[in-house]
Every structure is written in C-alpha cells, then in structure tokens.
Image: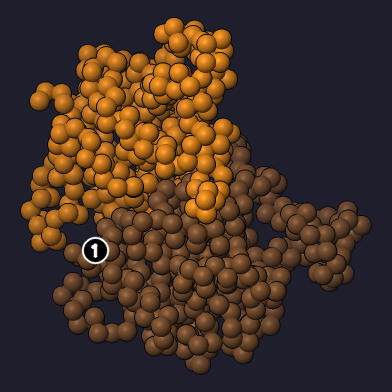
Chain colours: A orange, B brown
Amino acid sequence: MTSSDRFSEVGRRAILSALATLPMLLPVSALAQTAVTDPLPTWNDTATKKAIVTFVERVTKQGSPDFVPPAERIATFDNDGTLWAEQPNYFQLAFALDRVKTLAPQHPEWKDKEPFASLSKGDLKGALAGGEPAIFQIVTATHSGMTTEEFETIVRDWIATARHSTTGKPYTEMVYQPMLELLAHLRGNGFKTFIVSGGGIDFMRVFAEQLYGIPPEQIVGSSGKLNFELRDGKPVLVKLPELNFNDDKAGKPVGIEMHIGRRPILAFGNSDGDLQMLQWTATGSGARFMGLVHHTDAEREWAYDRTSSVGRLDKGLDEAKANNWTLASMKDDWKRVFPFEGK
Amino acid sequence: MTSSDRFSEVGRRAILSALATLPMLLPVSALAQTAVTDPLPTWNDTATKKAIVTFVERVTKQGSPDFVPPAERIATFDNDGTLWAEQPNYFQLAFALDRVKTLAPQHPEWKDKEPFASLSKGDLKGALAGGEPAIFQIVTATHSGMTTEEFETIVRDWIATARHSTTGKPYTEMVYQPMLELLAHLRGNGFKTFIVSGGGIDFMRVFAEQLYGIPPEQIVGSSGKLNFELRDGKPVLVKLPELNFNDDKAGKPVGIEMHIGRRPILAFGNSDGDLQMLQWTATGSGARFMGLVHHTDAEREWAYDRTSSVGRLDKGLDEAKANNWTLASMKDDWKRVFPFEGK
C-alpha cells in the first residue's frame, strides 16, 4: 500500500495533530520534557481518563507488579462506532450501495431481482428487509469478482470522494479525535495497536494506516475467500463470492487468536459485537483494561445503545456495569468528538 | 505466551549469538563502529552472500532509486527446510506421532483402525500409505479437542524434551545458523520478518519467538477451526477437528494477503511448496529478493531436491534458474549449518 494524497487537508491535519502526541517520534532527551504534556488533550478530566492513564502507567512502569513486557502490550480496537462513526449505517454499507449504483448498468438482470430492485428505486429499507441474505448479496456483488489490487483501487477512489449522508464530510474525517489520541498514547508507551472489526479486512486496510497509524498487518477483519491464479503468467489473487471469516461477536476472539496469537491486555469496543472480545481480554492474568465507547451525545454525534439496529449495546452494557469495565461517555468524557468539531 | 526456560543452553547460546549481530540493540553512536562487522559470519564469501548483502543495502539506502520505506520492508520465510530441518520427516509429524503414542491407551478403538493400527506396530510407512486422508486423521486426532491454551502447553512440553531421530538433538537446535543471522540482519535493517509455513500456526508460535525472534503475530501458518465457548463462565477457544486454512503452495500468497496485507519484498523458501510465495513476491514493483535454501550437503545435513518425498524442490528449481532467483547451497554457501556444528 502506498500513501495516497487524496485525503483532505482537514483529515490530514487531524492525523498530524494526533501524531504530535506520540513520544516515540521525539529524541530520547526530549521525553522528560514532554512528560508533563497531556497525552489525551480532548478527554475531559473524568474518572474515565484517569482509568486509562493509570492503566498505561501501571503496565509500563519497570518494577511495578503489573509491569507487562512491550511484546505483550497488545491493544485491540473495534472500528465502526469505536474509532469512526457508524450512523445512520456502517460506512462500508454506504460503499457497497454506491458500488451497486455504479455497477447497475452492467447488470440489467438486477431490475427484477431483490435486493437490487429495491435499491434501484432508492428504497434501502425494502432492500434490507431481506435481512442477512440480502446484505450478503449486496456485499458479494460489490466485493468479489476482482483482484485484490483492483479492489484496493476501487476503495481508495471511493473514500477519496464519498461524503457522509448527514454531515457532508468525507468519511475519513468522521473519526473520533479522542480515540486517535488514545491510539497514539498507547503506541508511545510500547503498545502494538490492532483493529479487530466486523468490517472487511481489505476495505479497512486501504485507509487504516494513514487514518489511525495502524499498518495492514495489524488489521483483523471479516474476509471473503481468495483464489491464487496466474493470468498471462502473472500471479493475482481473485476475490471470490464466498465468506472466509466473519470477524464479529464470537468471531472476534477467534480472529485475535488466528492473527495475533496473544491475548490483548486492552480492548475497546462499542457494541454487543465486541462483547466476546472484551470477555476474552478480561480473562487473561495480570492487569487488564476493557473499554466501551458509549454513544451518549445526540448533539455532537448520535445517542444510541440498547435498541439501536446499528451498533446495539445491550448485553455489553450490563456486563460492563457488572464487571467495572470502563464506559467512555461521548457526552461527558470527550471535549471534542470529531477533528473538525469546534475548529 | 511467556518465556520458557526449558530450552537447552546450547540452543540459547545459538540464539544469543545470532542476536548479537542485531544493530538495533546497540546505541546509535555505536552503529558506525559495527558497520565493518560481518552481519552474516557463517555465510561463505560467495555470490549468494553478496546478493543478500547488496539487496539489503539497495533497499535501505536513503536516496537510492531502490529505497523502500521501513513499513514496506516485509520479509517472509518458510519454516520447514528453510529455518530448521525437515528430514527424515517434518518435525510436526514427529510431534503428532509422539502424541498418538501418548493418547493410544485412551483410544482402544485405534487398534483396528488405520492409520493408528499401523502406527501402534511402529509401521510409519504403512500408516502413511493412506496418503493425505491418513495424515489428516493423525493431525486431527492430535491437534483438536482441546483448548488453545492446553495445546500450547502440550507443544511446549514436547519440544522441551523430544529428540530428533537421527541426530539425537532437541529440535530447537536443528535450526540453520546462517538463517538466524539473516533474520537478525534483516531486522537490524528495519525489515519485519514473518514466517509463512505450511506448518501449524499455533504449533510454531510456541517456539518461534524464542528460536527466531519472530513474535506470534508475525507467524502465518495452517490452522484448524476454533470455537469460542464459555466454560463455567470462562471464555475458551476450542480446537475443532476441521481444517480452517492450508497455508501451502497457492495458499501461501493467500495467507500473506490475509495476515500481512502487503506483498513481501524478500521471500525465502526451499521447496515447491514455496513456489507461489516466490512468484507472488517476484511480481511486485521495485527491488525484490527471492531465495531458496538448496539442500546440497549430505554430510552436514541432507542432500535432496527433485525427487524427495519431503521438501521436494523440482519446479521451483527450474523457475529459480530461469528467473535468477538466489539459490543458497548449504554445501557451498554455508560455513556452518546448525549452531552445534563445529562447536
């Protein structure tokens, strides 16, 4: 993956601002001077911020009974609703729907075939009434039949131009500034940060390095099967219309084991899809941190939890309260939500 | 994964000796002084060594037309026959056969059931006459039905005590000293080193970090399916008797794409099982290095290629010659094979 220069200046500035908090970029002699700088400037001084800062101190302090060697400082983050927004629907679904529109002229048969017929009339609700099979059809129609390199180009072009339906912002700006700071703070303290998301692994890899500083090999996600082929003697990997792995719910600990092979000591999610990842993280020995972004801010973002169709947080909320997991309330714990806010 | 102190002192010394060549462990001011130290002391001064050293210089020199940013310096290595030996049979098969012996008393039904009946008589050839289905039965009988943590303990105990059938050495000593030096040399030059092997991902992870300096998240391998379960409220991952992924041949580029998401710029294998990984590596743009360990040393190791049943190198040898891939001849290019040799 090479750097794209298609990200907007605003997004770029947000990233640079988050990266600026990263002590690793500074010469060692400057570390002491920056120790007094707040590593999480857009987090309010609440119990949540204190829990994060204290945890990082405990596991990184040499000689502390909770000290964890750098190689074992594994932190996993959900993506949709945890690192970037997910309303009114997952951004990858918006990508798929845009692709259906683009591809429709090549598929006259879609006119009489659900869920595509409803989509062509702009009836998203009707299209999604078919439930998971309908979504699977939309995803396979838009995420298979091309090489991995072709798919990367399609996603790269889309994310450079697409705009969110209600904010009008590029999706790459709809990331949570406090979470960018948290990622940088963890990496600055020797953590290896991973995404563990139900989203498509190759979809996220297109932007995750530039957006979050997380390289492709540290992305765990859902995937379709791939087939290795020689085309005119040149090897390609073709995306097949067949599910390989569903990295959601009970799939998340499995994805973690397959890709990382170590149990995280910190995990952050926001929905019941993250529950098993948090349970898995909680069960390891030694100091642990389990966090949930709680969407409590209808003004600056969205307010939803137990009854939302997207990003439902119901069982997870009960378990968090029962087990003293950390709830990061957008409204109370975050000074700012998006990088563009208040600017 | 925690450090085990069960590795023998000889193996430990071999690793330390390889790690000592790693410039990253030295303060920056010492780098200039160590530049004259040979980073590959057990490689003879042949064209092979020159090809390796020159490639690393080309891709790491700032301003060079072949310069590759550190994040893209991905190097992938096969394991069996490339990093450690694989004769007279894959070491993981030896593990499985030892497990069959251990488990046999709990399985009276095996007495009349192939391949176990043959194995109980010590007839390995008869057992393997059943081909891949027989091997699959042996593998599932010994690699499933337990939790991931239980399996890790089983492998850890085995590798601490098992001895190679002809050398009598622990398997952890049957690693190739020149390849340990190569791994360290690459990491010292900002490469991220990965294993991409047909071997079991969770089998290799037990020893790869201590043996090769490669952490669990940089191991790509074959795997069985896992199931997340709550046992007495405690989450566990149970190994199922079902293949999840076969990381061999055309599976290797697929495994690389799934786990790493970037094309390697250097790949090293030793058999036709590595052919597609090398083709995939070769097709990327910019400087590339494709290498094969060629088993040419019947005295110090084994001599085999085109007709061997284990680690056959036939098509790969033709392609290597046609495309000027680098052949590392054990006999001609390596001063020493194993760490214990010549000591």
Residue A162 at x, y percent in the picture: 29, 24
Is residue A171 at all visible to an observer of this figure?
yes
Residue bearing mark 1: B65
Q: Nearer the viewer, residue B6 or B61?
A: B61
Is residue A135 at all visible to an observer of this figure?
no
Q: Mark 1 Cα within 10 Å, few/some/many (few <14, many 20+)?
A: few
Q: Nearer the viewer, residue A300 or A272?
A: A300
Residue B339 at x, y percent in the picture: 49, 83
Q: Quadrant of residue A313?
A: top left
Residue A282 at x, y percent in the picture: 44, 40
- The correct choice, above or below, for B35 with respect to B197 in the image is below
Residue drawn at the location 25% of the way across and 85% of the way down: B36
Residue drawn at the location 48% of the way across and 65% of the way down: B77
Residue drawn at the location 34% of the way across and 67% of the way down: B187
- The correct choice, above or below, for B172 with respect to B130 in the image is below
Q: Indicate left or right for A50 with A1 as reference.
A: left
Q: Nearer the viewer, residue B160 or A212?
A: A212
Q: Nearer the viewer, residue A325 or B218?
A: B218
Q: Indicate left or right for B55 with A256 as reference.
A: left
Q: Secondary structure at mark 1?
A: loop
Give the residue type at disc 1.
Answer: Pro
Quadrant of the drawing holding the C terminus of chain A: top left
Q: Indicate left or right for A1 with B140 as reference.
A: left
Residue A235 at x, y percent in the picture: 50, 52
- Count of numbered tags: 1
Q: Residue furthest bottom?
A: B342
- The correct choice, above or below, for A113 with respect to B332 in the image is above
Q: Residue furthest left?
A: A33
Chain to which mark 1 belongs: B
